[in-house]
Image (spheres, grey):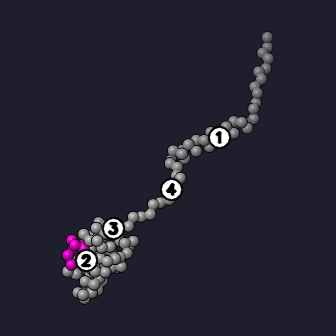
Amino acid sequence: MANLQEIGQTLKEAREAHGLTLEELSHRTHVSMRHLRAIEDGNEADLPEVFYVRGFLKKYAEAVGLSPTDVADAYSKAPIPTPTEPSMRYSVGPIAYYLLIVVVIVGVLALAWHFQPHVSVVSSPSPT
């Protein structure tokens, strides 16, 4: 098993042995120089999904005379770093927000009813 840094170093040595620059390799493989540099440096943060990286590695290996499947397989068998777990935060869903809006509206209506002037209607005596 090899990690990306070891694979990148092997590919870089093969590229240099063939007398290729990164720019020339980029033109041959149609892989951006940014991605090729990230592969050589073993910088997975600057690379896309594993599926695409395997394709880049195959193109790179083929261009420098290495076995594309061996290089891609070495990468896929390398341990993939797991992202850190996000902190557990309390979150409320949209139902809680709707409930809050209803409570606020009911509260405002209750206050408006409580403070409205109370007018008592007294009926006048009817003539008899």
Mark 2 to mark 4: distance in Å?
A: 41 Å
Q: Earlier in the sequence, mark 2 or mark 4?
A: 2
Q: Amino acid at mark 3?
A: Pro
Say which residue label 4 marks: 88
Judge the density around disc 3: few (<14), some (14-19), many (≥20) Cα neighbours within 10 Å.
few
Please tell me whether residue 93 is drawn above or below residue 52 in the rendered image.
above
Instruction: Say which residue appears at 20% left-offset and 80% top-offset.
Output: 65
Q: Earlier in the sequence, mark 3 or mark 2?
A: 2
Residue 26 in percent (x, y) is at 28, 80
Q: Nearer the viewer, mark 3 or mark 2?
A: 3
Q: Nearer the viewer, mark 2 or mark 1?
A: 2
Say which residue label 2 marks: 60
Say which residue label 1 marks: 107
Mark 3 to mark 4: distance in Å?
A: 26 Å
Q: Earlier in the sequence, mark 2 or mark 1?
A: 2
Visible residue check, residue 50 = yes
Q: Quadrant of residue 1?
A: bottom left
Q: Nearer the viewer, mark 1 or mark 4?
A: 4
Please tell me whether residue 94 is drawn above or below residue 52 in the rendered image.
above
- State which region is magenta: 66-72
Say if mark 2 contacts mark 4, CB within 8 Å: no
Q: Nearer the viewer, residue 118 or 83?
A: 83
Mark 3 to mark 2: distance in Å?
A: 21 Å
- Badge 2 marks a residue whose secondary structure is helix
Residue 38 in percent (x, y) is at 35, 77
Q: Amino acid at mark 4?
A: Met
Is residue 70 shown in magenta? yes
